[in-house]
Amino acid sequence: MRCAAIVFLTVGSLFAVPASAEPGLDQILAEIRRGEAAREAALRETVYTAEARVVEWKDSTRRAAKRENLSVRRVYTRVPDLFHEEYLSMTIDGRRLSEAEIEGELAKQRRGGRGRGGQGRFESPFRAEAADLYEFRLLGETTLEGRPVLRIGFAPREPDAGRFEGTLLVSAADYQPLHVQMAPSMLPGILEEFAMSIRFAEIGGYRLPAYLFMEMRIRVNILVTLADRTLSIEDHYSDYRLNPGLPDELFAQTGRSRDSGGSRR
């Protein structure tokens, strides 16, 4: 599931034990993959509201904010990769922007490579197709909001900027995901820091993202430091509609692009 026009966590001895040595792990992984497959097969389209808070900090200590952007947008998706979003409102440092100003802000973000495409979307390590790419370990039980949950550690067999390592919490009742914390197994490009967590909620019988939090530090050095930005991003998802039957025209402009779809007209 995507939250920004984009998408979507070392390891050492933690993952040294093969999955088959952990009692019950194979069954748990099979149930997680079954749930992933069922969701992918059933949900062809989604519509949801995303409320975002993006903070750019003055420095990497994250003690003082340099700029705060609050926005509400309506997001439309269709598998495999169609995406459209409409900004309903945007406020920067307490000032509400007009529609024209929202368009200008989005254009500025795209020029600076800061479009929201793909945020919150990633290739899940728990899909059946990824089984041979990752190692897993059952880390024990804990509780989440008073409910018993199981902790599963995961990491790619070969570090890669597009693959994540981290910990997934699944319900001890049905083995479906509740919360994941992760980071790239190898930081890509200009990223000096990147971490992401996603909370899931049951929507229409499926576990879908309800909250996403990301922290990142982007640093560009060519002889001297050209850019050094520290960001925190929160996204809350609500008002889901599943398979609503969206018109093709909705995706006519954005198509497979991960750019923003503009503000609401």
Image (tube, rainbow, N blue to C red):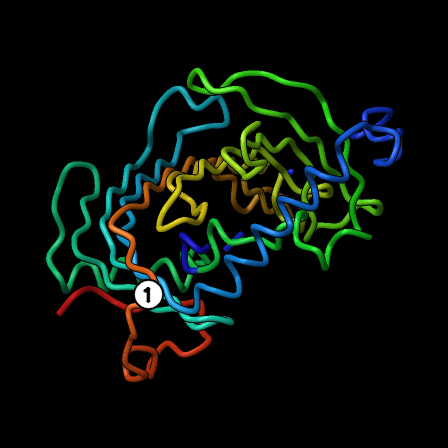
Rendered location of residue 95, percent (x, y): 13, 42
Rendered location of residue 259, percent (x, y): 40, 67
Q: Is residue 50 visible?
A: yes
**Neighbour class for label 1 at 10 Å: few (<14), some, many (≥20)?**
many
Q: How many numbered circles are shown?
A: 1
In-front residue for pair 82/90: 82
User: Based on the displayed image, in which of its 4 quarters is residue 65 positioned?
Assistant: top left
At x 28% / y 58%, what residue is drawn?
241
Q: State whether residue 175 is above or below residue 44.
A: above
Q: State whether residue 33 is above or below residue 260.
A: above
Q: In terms of secondary structure, where does tag 1 sit?
A: strand
Q: Is residue 103 left or right of residue 163?
A: left
User: Based on the displayed image, in which of its 4 quarters is residue 185 positioned?
Assistant: top right
At x 61% / y 36%, what residue is drawn?
182
In-front residue for pair 100/29: 29
Q: Is residue 222 visible?
A: no
Q: Which residue is mark 1?
A: 76
At x 44% / y 55%, what residue is drawn?
2
At x 13% / y 52%, what residue is drawn?
97
In-front residue for pair 187/169: 169
Query: Disc 1 residue type?
Result: Tyr
User: Based on the displayed image, in which of its 4 quarters is residue 99 positioned?
Assistant: bottom left
Rendered location of residue 238, percent (x, y): 28, 46
Rendered location of residue 265, percent (x, y): 12, 70
